[in-house]
């Protein structure tokens, strides 16, 4: 039978308009970079090398990403941490073998401080696993996965090219969910170089908690009826919503607030309800209030470890109810008896408590912070006192300045004498306490927020460890101000030995002219010996794109007031 006029017979060959277009394959390295960009990861730190080269090559094809080349892998991790704490989750790229082993201290620091970031380590080709390839990190040689497993939330090797995007999504989701932290992906170079057809999958990740309403009700009642309550705020309350909610809670209850060292600035220190810092470098006001036995304590986002409690001070125990809020249930009751433990993110738990409260009468006005030896921050002396340095730095820089502190005796002075009112106004890697962490954090913070002044308070020995990242700042026009307290010695070490043993080995070295060192790198170097030298600093110090090194000559004989750390060491050594 003939077809009707105007109708063509069906053909065994499909029309060209119905042909299935073959999907375009892409290199795995490009798929990984595209996936990270889709997830909001656009800042890269690290040091190039052969095994990680496909990722670096893929970055050249990717718009909207920024790549910074560092001078040391741990420095790259410290910088990434500073970037992350300013709200921009970064990626660190390291090559195989020593590239990753160099980075482990930085990974451990990020893990201890719950800082989310992604580390990708290049690896030798799969066919060479177990053959003794140069810098091989597979399980048959260095077994780098085993090395990093205890200092990451998630660690995996991307063995299947087709699953690369899915593994990256899982890694980023893990870094950002629950108690946040770093993740590590090992990437064999042959996997990175292979081409596959990209797959499409969901990238939405969220963490939720179910609150026990009865416990919330009991917590609210205890807070409302407290006669002498205390709110203790840790770094787990760094979420912007939690910062606001803590302030609302304190003002509704007219309840004093102390922060841990890692939480410094999360409650404004010029607020009339602020007691300052409790723990290492803490204020007499916070110590005295706690020693006077509060009847209710609410700890928000505090692990209550050594630095946060001045070596587990036994007076941190209320006469009535101890309430602890933490996203990590294993932290609740770990070091102190807790009556009511609420598991969840601070910004998710606090609204439920606040909704059950009513405002109480306003208490007396005026800041409650009391400092140890406040005259040290004011008096003129022949050689600058570290407390005076903190006061002078604060006078030089605007209120939106981000201060970071490295690890050393200067950290105690920074915690104690700086007045910080912004939640991101003070950053320090206190969780692990690694020298150099505050230097890298400052660079990462300035990289993430170039419009704000950033001052890195550090010691001369820490700057000798990681100060070569100054060259990175010069290369990329990152205008960090490095305030180097130059006393020519490892003062915290000497002071600790002296307090515990009554004597110490000299831990000093040749004098270093850090201002000249800065000039040699193309940075700005200034020697500071007096308060007048600070007064001569112009606005270009914090407004320019060139990094600045302030070589601040400080009194080498000064020690911070005795604290629980040295007593703890004395107990261990039998000298207590």
Image (cartoon, helix red, strand yellow):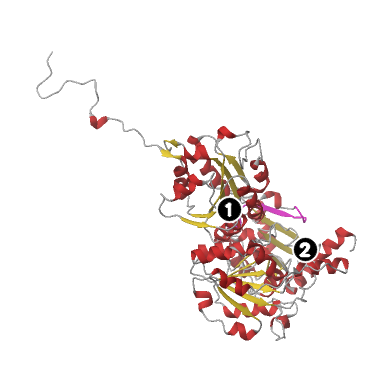
Which residue corresponds to the image point at 51% horizontal and 79% vertical from the top-left?
539
Q: Residues within 10 Å of mark 1 (few under 14, many from 20)?
A: many
Question: How many discs mark residues in the rendered view?
Answer: 2
Identify the magenta region: 334-347
Could you tell me residue 81's position as x and y percent? 59, 58
Residue 412 sits inside the magenta stretch:
no
Task: Quickly name the residue at label 2.
Answer: 316
Rendered-image quadrant of the N terminus: top left
Quarter holding residue 236: bottom right
Could you tell me residue 561's position as x and y percent? 78, 73
Residue 566 as seen in the image, left or right of residue 194: right
Seen from the viewer's position, the closer of residues 44 and 253 is 44
Disc on the earlier residue, 1 or 2: 1
- Report how far apart the C-alphas of labels 1 and 2 lie in the structure: 30 Å
Residue 345 as seen in the image, left or right of residue 202: right
- The mark closer to the camera, 1 or 2, is 1
Which residue corresponds to the image point at 17% horizontal and 20% vertical from the top-left?
9
Could you tell me residue 522's position as x and y percent? 53, 70
């Amino acid at each position: 039978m003939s077809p009707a006029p105007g109708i063509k017979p069906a053909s065994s060959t499909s029309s060209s308009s119905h042909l299935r277009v073959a999907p375009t394959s892409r290199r795995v390295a490009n798929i990984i970079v595209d996936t990270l960009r889709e997830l909001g990861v656009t800042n890269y730190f690290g040091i190039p090398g052969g095994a990680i080269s496909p990722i670096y090559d893929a970055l050249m094809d990717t718009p909207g990403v920024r790549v910074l080349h560092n001078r040391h892998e741990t420095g790259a991790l410290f910088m990434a941490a500073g970037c992350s704490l300013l709200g921009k989750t970064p990626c660190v790229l390291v090559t195989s073998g020593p590239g990753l082993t160099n980075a482990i201290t930085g990974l451990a620091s990020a893990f201890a401080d719950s800082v989310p970031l992604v580390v990708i380590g290049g690896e030798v080709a799969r066919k060479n696993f177990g053959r003794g390839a140069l810098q091989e990190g597979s399980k048959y040689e260095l077994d780098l996965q085993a090395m990093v497993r205890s200092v990451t939330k998630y660690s995996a090797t991307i063995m299947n090219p087709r699953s690369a995007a899915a593994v990256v999504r899982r890694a980023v989701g893990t870094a950002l969910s629950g108690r946040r932290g770093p993740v590590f992906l090992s990437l064999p170079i042959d996997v990175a170089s292979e081409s596959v057809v990209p797959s499409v999958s969901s990238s939405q990740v969220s963490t939720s908690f179910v609150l026990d309403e009865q416990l919330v009700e009991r917590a609210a009642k205890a807070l409302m009826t407290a006669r002498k309550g205390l709110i203790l705020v840790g770094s787990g309350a760094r979420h912007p919503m939690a910062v606001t909610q803590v302030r609302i809670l304190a003002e509704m209850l007219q309840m004093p607030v102390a922060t841990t060292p890692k939480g410094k600035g999360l409650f404004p220190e010029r607020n009339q309800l602020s007691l300052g810092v409790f723990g290492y470098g803490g204020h007499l006001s916070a110590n005295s209030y706690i020693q006077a036995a509060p009847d209710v304590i609410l700890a928000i986002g505090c692990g209550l470890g050594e630095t946060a409690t001045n070596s587990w001070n036994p007076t941190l125990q209320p006469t009535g109810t101890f309430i602890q809020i933490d996203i990590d249930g294993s932290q609740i009751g770990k070091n102190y008896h807790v009556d009511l433990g609420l598991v969840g993110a601070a910004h998710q738990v606090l609204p439920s408590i606040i909704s059950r409260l009513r405002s109480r009468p306003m208490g007396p006005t005026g800041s409650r912070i009391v400092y140890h030896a406040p005259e040290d921050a004011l008096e003129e002396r022949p050689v600058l006192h570290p407390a005076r340095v903190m006061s002078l730095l604060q006078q030089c820089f605007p209120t939106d300045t981000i201060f970071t502190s490295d690890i050393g005796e200067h950290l105690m002075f920074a915690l104690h004498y700086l007045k910080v009112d912004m939640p991101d106004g003070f950053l320090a890697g206190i969780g692990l306490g690694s020298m150099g962490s505050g230097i890298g954090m400052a660079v990462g913070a300035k990289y993430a927020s170039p419009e704000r002044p950033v001052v890195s308070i550090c010691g001369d020995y820490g700057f000798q460890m990681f100060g070569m990242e100054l060259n990175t700042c010069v290369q990329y026009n990152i205008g960090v101000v490095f305030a180097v307290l130059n006393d020519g010695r490892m003062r915290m070490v000497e002071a600790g030995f002296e307090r515990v043993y009554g004597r110490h080995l000299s831990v000093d070295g040749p004098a270093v002219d850090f201002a000249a060192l800065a000039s040699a790198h193309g940075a700005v170097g200034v020697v500071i010996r007096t308060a007048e030298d600070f007064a001569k600093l112009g606005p270009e110090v914090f407004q320019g794109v060139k990094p600045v090194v302030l070589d601040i000559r400080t009194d080498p004989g000064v020690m911070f007031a005795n604290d629980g750390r040295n007593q703890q060491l004395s107990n261990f050594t039998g000298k207590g």
